[in-house]
Image (tube, grey):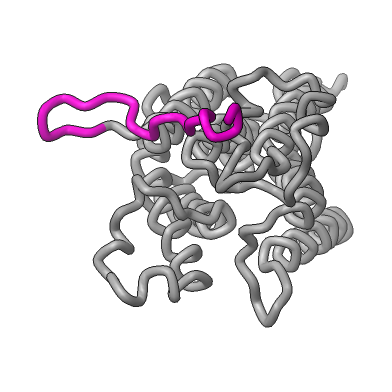
Amino acid sequence: MMLLSIQPMDPVFLELGPLTIQWYGLLIGLGALFGYLLANHEAKKRGLPDDLIADLLLWMLPMGIIGARIYYVIFRWEQFADNPVSVFFIWEGGIAIHGGLIAGTITGLVFAKKKGYSFWKLADIAGPSVLLAQAIGRWGNFVNQEVYGHEVSRQFLENLFLPEFIINQMFINGAYYQPTFLYESIWNLLGVAFLLYLRKVNLRQGEIFMSYVIWYSVGRFIIEYMRTDQLLFFGIPTAMLLSAALIIGALALIYYRRKNGLAEARYLDDPSPKSKGKSNKGTTKKKSKK
């Protein structure tokens, strides 16, 4: 009787007449907002224009959502085949972060080229912010009862010292499940702290972003193994395949750029286009004595 009385959270946050705001969309929006604030603060410290990150977000956010939805639909077409219009019902859930990352990266490349800034510099600034947005956005999956793992007992969840509202929300269709959304959210938050630390190390440009790719991919590879709602490619979870490829690719690119002298600039170097070609700060040409 107690189990039957457990009710899932209402996915609707607020209804104002014909306007309905879902928790899912709200949390994705909050993730984007906090990610923007973090990136914008860092961009100003690095001497970038005040509106540069806002302009970048205006392009990256919609393109990222479109890419994430397309990726999900491709691997879950059977879910939409009977009602193709539901492809556009994104507020019901169903986006794949890897699709968003691919679309967002391509958008960032084009944006940086048009604005005349180093893509790697902008990517380094954006890396921790994207991971923060992902950490917050995963709670939208929690409300929708998505992104959960294999069946477990209630005792297992209680042993994790989880609050009651999380345990109850993990009761889905008569059974309890692993809160893999939570594992990924925590992993991502730890990654944000790690990437912020790497800023002080003053790595070569691009390597904070590559560290983001590696950090997220390691966590996603492990956590994806626990999930029950995997997108599959010939029976293999696509997220595990792509995560493995991204880890190898990021490490190889770091090595290649260093070996070929393509990563001489450092993260804390002057990012403005006008600084290109100028001598380093503090260097003075001494007059020769006659």
Q: Write down the quadrant of residue 236 in the picture.
A: bottom right
Horizontal side of residue 147 vs 12, given as left or right: right
Tell me, yes or no, if residue 104 can be seen here.
yes
Residue 145's x, y, as percent? 53, 42
Measuring 59% from the left and 22% from the top, which residue is drawn there?
Answer: 165
Is residue 76 placed above or below 68 in the rendered structure?
below
Residue 259's x, y, as percent? 88, 59
The N terminus - image quarter: top right
Is residue 132 placed above or below 79 in the rendered structure?
above
Residue 81's x, y, as percent? 35, 76
Measuring 54% from the left and 34% from the top, which residue is drawn there?
Answer: 4
Is residue 252 placed above or below 148 in the rendered structure?
below
Residue 273's x, y, as percent? 51, 38
- Magenta range is 1-20
Residue at the extreme left of the image, as rendered: 17
Tell me, yes or no, if residue 277 can be seen here.
no
Is residue 60 placed above or below 269 in the rendered structure?
below
All told, the count of numbered labels is 0
Q: Write down the quadrant of residue 80 in the picture.
A: bottom left
Magenta-span inclusion, residue 214: no
The C terminus - image quarter: top right
Give 30 or 153, whichever is nearer the viewer.
153
